[in-house]
Structure formats: C-alpha cells, structure tokens
Amino acid sequence: MINLIFLPNLIRNRVEIRDDKLYLYFGFFKDSMEIASIKEVRKTHNPISSSAASLDRLLIL
C-alpha cells in the first residue's frame, strides 16, 4: 500500500518545457503554466510551498 502512494512521486517527478509552456509532473499530478506569465523564480525551503520530494525548491511567481 505504501508503494502505491510514494513510488509514483519518485518515478514521475519532472519538468518539461514545450512550445511556450512549462509542464510540471509529480506523481499523479500534472500542472502547466505559460512561460510569459512567470514574473519571478526564487529559491525556498518552505515545506508547504510544493509537493516536491526535496526541500530544495523553487517558488515560481
């Protein structure tokens, strides 16, 4: 049961840039945003800022 929850997060954890969009994949979740709408990118260690498997994270504004 634990593998069903955590294994997809470790296997499917990537970022892709295609056309003019940024695609974020994490486990069963997928999100996208227009690159032109990004105003700022900052480094953060906030654990609630993302569902990332690491504490070294980027905050995209």
Image (cartoon, rainbow, N blue to C red):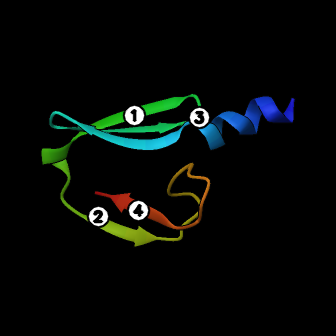
Amino acid marked by disc 1? Asp
Does residue 51 lie above or below 4 as drawn?
below
Is label 3 in a helix, a strand or a loop? loop
User: Front-most of 49 and 52?
Assistant: 52
Residue at 57% across / 48% down in the picture?
51
Marks 4 and 2, Cα distance to the nearest angstrom?
7 Å
Mark 1 crowd level (few <14, some 14–19, many ≥20, 10 Å Cα) = few
Marks 2 and 1, Cα distance to the nearest angstrom?
17 Å
Marks 3 and 1, Cα distance to the nearest angstrom?
11 Å
The residue wearing badge 4 is 58
Marks 3 and 4, Cα distance to the nearest angstrom?
18 Å
Residue 22 percent across, percent down from the top left: 28, 41
Q: Sequence-wise, which precedes: disc 3 or disc 4?
A: 3
| In front: label 3 or label 1 | 3
Amino acid marked by disc 3? Gly
Q: Sequence-wise, which precedes: disc 3 or disc 2?
A: 3
Instruction: Determine whether label 4 and label 2 are within 8 Å by CB.
Output: yes
The residue wearing badge 2 is 41
The residue wearing badge 1 is 31
Task: Tell me the number on the disc at residue 27.
Answer: 3
Residue 41 percent across, percent down from the top left: 29, 64
Is label 4 in a helix, a strand or a loop? strand
On-image quarter of the C terminus: bottom left
Amino acid marked by disc 4? Leu
Marks 3 and 2, Cα distance to the nearest angstrom?
23 Å
Instruction: Determine whether label 3 and label 1 are within 8 Å by CB.
Output: no
Does residue 61 lie above or below 13 as drawn?
below
